[in-house]
Amino acid sequence: MNIDFVARKVELTDNIRELASKKLAKINKYFNEILDVRVELTQERHLYVVDLFIHGKDFDARATAQHKDIRSAIQDAVEKLEIQARKGKTRLKGRKRQSEQERRTPDWGVEVLEKESVASGHPRIIKSSSITIKPMTIEEAALQLESSPRDFIVFLNASTDRVNVLYRRRDNNLGLITPEL
C-alpha cells in the first residue's frame, strides 16, 4: 500500500507517518486492492484537520476529521473511513448476490396466443415482448419508471421477494399491483 503524505502548516514526523500507516493497515481488509492512499494534514488555528483519500479497485472512500490533537484527528478520520469501507464492501457483496439472484429469476415471456382465438375473430396479440425482472425496491422502481418510455415496470420486490407491477395512472400518480399466487 503506497501512502502519500501532504502536510500544510504541520511538521510531519516519522511518528505521525508510522501512526497513520498502522491505522490505515486496518482498512486494507475492506478493499480487494488499494491502488492509492493520500493523507493530507493541515493545521487551521488551533485544530488539526486530517483528510484521507483511498482509491481502491472496487470503490473509493474519503474521510475528514478535526481535533486539537493530531493523533486523535488521524484516529477519527480512520474510523470514519472504516465505516465507509465497511458499507462499501457490504454494498458490493449485495450487488454480487443480487446478480446471482437475477440469473435465477425466470424470464417471463408474453406468449398467451391460442390458435382458436385468431380464427374466431377475438382480439389478437399483435406484439409479443420479453421482460427481464430485476430485484429492486419500490422507490428504485419508481425512479426507473420515470426514465422509462413505458407506462409500467415489472420488478421483483427486494423486501418481499414477490413480483410486482408499478404503473403510471392517468392522473399522473403511480399504482402498484402485487399478484397473489
Image (cartoon, helix red, strand yellow):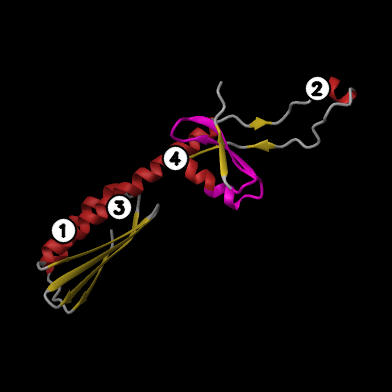
Q: What residue type is labelled 4?
A: Lys
Residue 18 in sight: no
Quadrant (top left, top right, bottom left, bottom right) of the C terminus: top right
The label number, if any, that marks residue 84 in the structure image: 3
Q: Nearer the viewer, mark 1 or mark 2?
A: 2
Residue 172 or residue 130, whichever sits in front: 172
* Mark 3–mark 1 distance (CA, rounded to whole Å): 14 Å
Q: Which amino acid does label 3 sit on?
A: Gln
Looking at marks 3 and 1 on the same chain, the residue that comes earlier in the sequence is marked by 1
Q: Quadrant of residue 8?
A: bottom left
Question: Residue 84 at what x, y percent from top left?
Answer: 30, 52
Question: Residue 108 at what x, y percent from top left?
Answer: 64, 30
Q: Mark 1 points at which residue?
A: 75
- Is the residue marked by circle 1 packed among few (<14), some (14-19), or many (20+) residues within 10 Å? some
Looking at marks 2 and 3 on the same chain, the residue that comes earlier in the sequence is marked by 3
For image coordinates 74% across by 26% down, the residue present is: 112
Q: Mark 4 points at which residue?
A: 96
